[in-house]
Image (spheres, rainbow, N blue to C red):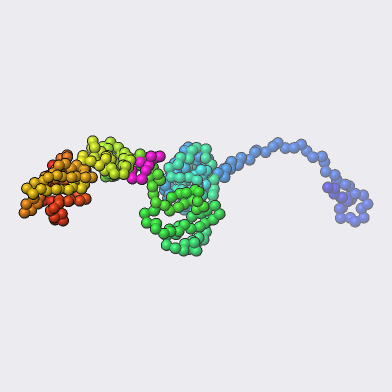
Amino acid sequence: MSVNLNNSTDCCNTDCTNTTVNVPGPQGNAGSAGTNGTNGTNGYNGYSVTDAAFTIPSANTNTNIPVDHTGWIAATPTADTQIIFIGNAGHFLVSGKGTGHITGKPLFYTTDPGTVGQVIPAGTVVSPAGLQGPAGATGDASTLLTAKGDLITRTSTGATTIGVGSATDGKTLFANSALNTGLEWKAINFTDVSGKINLGTQTDTTNKLPLDRLTGPSDQEGDLAYYNGTSWARLPHGSDGQVLTVSGGVPAWVAASSSGLSVVAEGDISFTLISSGTIDATAITNALNLSASTCWAGTTSSATIAFDSAIGTDRPVVIFTNIDASPLNTSDWVVTSSSATGL
C-alpha cells in the first residue's frame, strides 16, 4: 500500500506540486510454531464381535451376550428399544448393556436360524437390525375344503385336497411318494410297521411282538403267531383236515386222530341182534377211535360203544353220522352217560 503526502509543511495547502510516496518494507522472518491441539477420540465400529461363546435361551428370556465393545448400543434408559441381529442366532431385543456385554432376549422371527440351546461361538458378528414387518394376510383354505374330513396337501404344482373317502374307519394316513399328493389312506399291515407292539402292561418290556418275525417270503393265509415263552414265533397254517392242538407246550397242527382231539369220534355204526337179545355182529364203517361194541335188547334197547384210546372226560361226546340197530327203532337213541373209554 502507498500513501501520498503533501511535501509542504502545511498539509492543508492545496497548491503543493511535490509528493512523497511511502512503500512498505520487506516481510520479516516467520515466527515459531504454536502448540498442537488435543487429538480427538477414536470412533466405534457400527457392530460388535462376540469375544466368548454363549447359549441361546428360550423365548422372552434375557441373557448376556459377551462382545468386544458396546459403544454403538444405545444407553437404553428405557428398556426394549433396540433390536440386534447375531449371526447364526437371529434377532434379539436389547434390554441393557455393560462395557463388555449386551443384555437381550431372542425374538425367534420366522426366518431366524437359531434354536433354543444352540451355542453361538466367539467371533460372531453382532449388528444393528430393524423390527420384523407386519404379518401378511391370513390365507383362506375354505374354497379347497368342501367335504367332511378333507385334508390340504401340496403337489408339485400347487395345493390340493385329499378326501377322507369311503369306508375309512380304521385306516391310516401313509406317505406314498409314487402318488401326486404324496399321501394315501390305507389299512395298516404288518409290513407297514417296524419295531415292536407292546402286548403287556406299559412297564412290560419283554412280552412284545416283533413284527419283522411275522413277515417275509413264507407268509401264507392262515398263519398264526404265538409266544413260545421267550419270543414271538410264526406257526404256518396246517393242511386241510388237520386240527390245532398243543404239543410240548406250544400250538401245533396234527392229523385228525384220537390223540389230542376235541371231537372224539365219527362214523357209521350198525347193530344186528339175534333172538336171545345179544349182539350177533357189529359193523363199524368210516370210524375214528371206535372199537367193538355190545348191545342188549329188552324193554329198552341199549348199546355200549368203546373207544380205541381213552380221552379226557371234559371232551365233547361222540358224533355219529348214522346209528342203525335193526330191527330196533333207529330214531330214539340218546347218550345216557360217557367216560374216558366209552359211552
Viewer-side residue, 309 vs 158: 309
Viewer-side residue, 235 vs 6: 235
Taking the spot 93% from the left edge, 52% from the top edge, the residue there is 17
Q: Is residue 287 magenta?
A: no
Count all numbered tags in the image, as a single digit: 0
In the current view of this chain or complex, which residue is farthest to the front? 275
Q: State the image coordinates of residue 203 (x, y, percent, origin top left).
A: 27, 42
Taking the spot 43% from the left edge, 45% from the top edge, the residue there is 116
Q: State the image coordinates of residue 313 (x, y, percent, origin top left).
A: 14, 44
Q: Main secondary structure of the magenta part?
A: loop
In this view of the protein, can residue 219 be seen by the observer? yes
Q: State the image coordinates of residue 69 (x, y, percent, origin top left).
A: 52, 41
Viewer-side residue, 158 vs 262: 262
In this view of the protein, can residue 94 be seen by the observer? no
Quadrant housing residue 332 = bottom left
Taking the spot 50% from the left edge, 63% from the top edge, the residue there is 143
Viewer-side residue, 128 vs 141: 141
312 lies left or right of 142: left
Taking the spot 39% from the left edge, 51% from the top edge, the residue there is 187
Indicate whether 243 appears above or below 155: above
90 lies left or right of 232: right
Q: State the image coordinates of residue 286 (x, y, percent, origin top left).
A: 23, 45
**Magenta extent:** 214-223
214 lies left or right of 25: left
